[in-house]
Image (cartoon, rainbow, N blue to C red):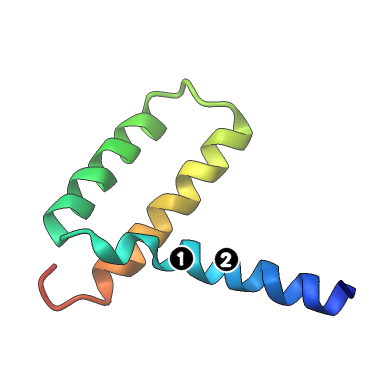
Amino acid sequence: MTSKQYIKGEMGAATKDWNAWAVFTAAELKMKLAELQKLVDSGMLTDRSLEHQLTEIGIIENELAGRNDA
């Protein structure tokens, strides 16, 4: 596998992960968003975990923003 193919494969995986939240209802996404925000606000996360949770929050917020039922 060439490095170009490897990068393309990684991008495909990232796109798939990005769309993972699309199968949930707006209510489910809002509930998950609240849970993640509570976890972030707790101050008990490592820097790496905090960064990951903030990324997930951003993805969910973007998913909700793009919906008509949100």
Q: Residue furthest front?
A: 1
Q: Residue at x 26, y 44 (%)?
A: 32
Which labelled disc corresponds to residue 37? none
Dots 1, 2 in contact, CB < 8 A: yes
Q: Residue at x 56, y 43 (%)?
A: 51
Q: Residue at x 47, y 47 (%)?
A: 54
Label 2 sits on a secondary structure element that is: helix
**Image quadrant occupied by the N terminus:** bottom right
Front residue (pair 6, 26): 6
Please, is residue 24 above or below residue 65 in the view?
above
Q: Which residue is mark 1?
A: 18
Quarter occupied by residue 34:
top left
Where does residue 47 sit, x and y in percent of width and height? 61, 33
Left-right relation of 57 to 17: left
Where does residue 66 sit, x and y in percent of width and height? 27, 77
Disc 2 marks a residue whose amino acid type is Ala
Label 1 sits on a secondary structure element that is: helix
Distance between the alpha carbons at the discs numbered 1 and 2: 6 Å
Quarter occupied by residue 68:
bottom left
Q: Which residue is mark 2?
A: 14
Where does residue 35 sit, x and y in percent of width and height? 27, 36
